[in-house]
Image (tube, helix red, strand yellow):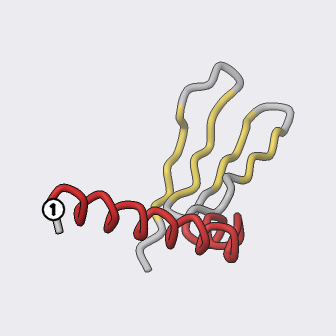
Amino acid sequence: MNEKRRKFLKFIIVAGGVAVLAKVFGFGLWKLLFPPRIEKDFDEFKVTKDRKEMIIFDKKGEEILIIDDKK
């Protein structure tokens, strides 16, 4: 068989496998790897939290405090 044809068929098979896995797992795997950022607005400041850190902003949007999560 032609080498270019084998590479093309291998690419098609791998891409099909990825598409099938994406359909099976859907967004559940995506949310597990990259959880959504949580934001809460208060009168004088805003707090955002994700998997790595928690940041506290003032009204103008300037960072007041950054707390890293070191697990």
Q: Give neighbour class at mark 1: few <14, some 14-19, many 20+ (Cα, 10 Å).
A: few
Q: Residue furthest bottom?
A: 71
Determine whether the residue tagged by mark 1 lies in a helix, strand or loop.
loop
How far from the left and from the top, in percent, is residue 67?
50, 58
> Which residue, as the protein is rendered here, is positioned at the far front?
1
Relative to 51, residue 59 above or below: above
What's the amino acid at mark 1? Asn
Residue located farthest toward the right when viewing the structure as drawn: 43
- Residue 63's spot in the image, x, y percent? 53, 34
Q: Residue at 50% of width from left, 73% of height from top?
A: 17
Instruction: Work out whether 16 lies above or below 37.
Output: below
Q: Is residue 60 left or right of residue 69?
A: right
Name the residue located 75 percent from the left edge and 46 percent from the top edge: 39
Say how many tags the image has.
1
Q: Quadrant of the C terminus?
A: bottom left
Q: Is residue 40 above or below residue 45?
A: below
Q: Residue at x 40, y 69 (%)?
A: 14
Residue 44: give x, y in percent of width and height.
78, 31
Report the residue marked by disc 1: 2
- Asked where in the image residue 1 lies, by quadrant, the reply is bottom left
On screen, 61 above or below 34? above
Residue at far left of view: 3
Depth order, front residue of 20/40: 20
Q: Quadrant of residue 41?
A: top right
